[in-house]
Image (cartoon, helix red, strand yellow):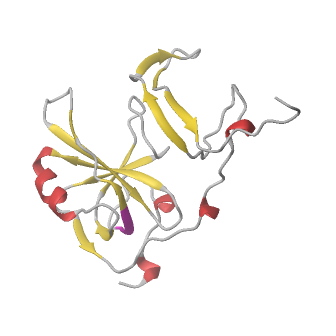
């Protein structure tokens, strides 16, 4: 397959058909149980060469197949996944879409290694982050996760609902003190 036929995550649209992506497995995920039908699902985190991440959702009927075929830190050609709009009631790593891997999705390990530079990210130091902002934008931070609190539901001013989760990070950089502090 020629590179010109490959899609990037940012070029995908919900319900798009017949696409092939080169993705790297960042996290295989663990089995979660859907409250709707009490069957397990797995959320796999993929990364493309542009540094864009996306969930790959695997439902119970295809879980064993994909668990055996997708290994951490390896790159794959993934053809014909279902591309769905995200469910805004659940946290997601991509603001628009997620992939659903079905039994008709084709996966082939590739030597097309996903490597990207840190230029794909705009890392901030903890001291440069504003404490709070009404129009906060996503940002990239490196830190150690100290605690992850339960996801909570909330109601916005426009009466729509959302969910959020507090994650407490520890700064990895040494604290710099000045003026005899």
Q: Using the rendered view, name the quadrant where residue 149 is placed.
A: top left
Q: Position of residue 131 (x, y in %)?
A: 70, 26
Viewer can see residue 103: no
The residue nearer to you, when weighing 87 against 147, is: 147
Q: Is residue 8 within the magenta segment?
A: no
Q: Residue furthest front?
A: 180
Q: Is residue 41 left or right of residue 6?
A: left
Q: Is residue 20 within the magenta segment?
A: yes
Q: Position of residue 132 (x, y in %)?
A: 69, 25
**Residue found 52% across the figure and 14% down from its top:** 159
Viewer can see residue 64: yes
Establish if 13 lies above or below 144: below
Q: Position of residue 29 (x, y in %)?
A: 28, 47
Q: Using the rendered view, name the quadrant where residue 17 is placed.
A: bottom left
The residue nearer to you, when weighing 115 against 94, is: 115
Question: Which portion, as a residue range, is magenta?
Answer: 19-24
- Quadrant containing the C terminus in the rendered view: top right
**Residue found 37% across the figure and 64% down from its top:** 24
**Residue found 61% across the figure and 56% down from its top:** 121
Establish if 178 lies above or below 59: above
Establish if 180 lies above or below 160: below
Q: Position of residue 28 (x, y in %)?
A: 28, 52
- Quadrant containing the N terminus in the rendered view: bottom left
Q: Is residue 61 left or right of residue 152?
A: left
């Amino acid at each position: 397959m020629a590179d010109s036929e490959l899609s990037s995550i940012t070029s995908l649209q919900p319900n798009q058909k017949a696409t092939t992506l080169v993705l790297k497995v960042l996290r295989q995920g663990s089995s979660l149980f859907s409250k709707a039908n009490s069957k397990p699902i797995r959320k796999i985190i993929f990364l493309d060469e542009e540094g864009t991440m996306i969930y790959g959702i695997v439902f119970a009927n295809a879980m064993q197949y994909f668990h055996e075929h997708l290994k951490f830190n390896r790159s794959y050609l993934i053809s014909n996944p279902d591309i769905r709009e995200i469910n805004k009631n659940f946290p997601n790593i991509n603001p628009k879409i997620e992939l659903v891997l079905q039994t008709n999705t084709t996966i082939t390990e590739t030597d097309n290694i996903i490597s990207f530079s840190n230029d794909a990210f705009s890392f901030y130091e903890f001291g440069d982050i504003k404490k709070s902002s009404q129009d906060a934008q996503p940002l990239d931070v490196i830190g150690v996760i100290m605690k992850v609190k339960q996801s909570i539901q909330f109601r916005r001013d426009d009466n729509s609902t959302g969910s959020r989760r507090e994650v407490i990070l520890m700064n990895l950089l040494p604290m710099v003190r000045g003026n005899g502090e």
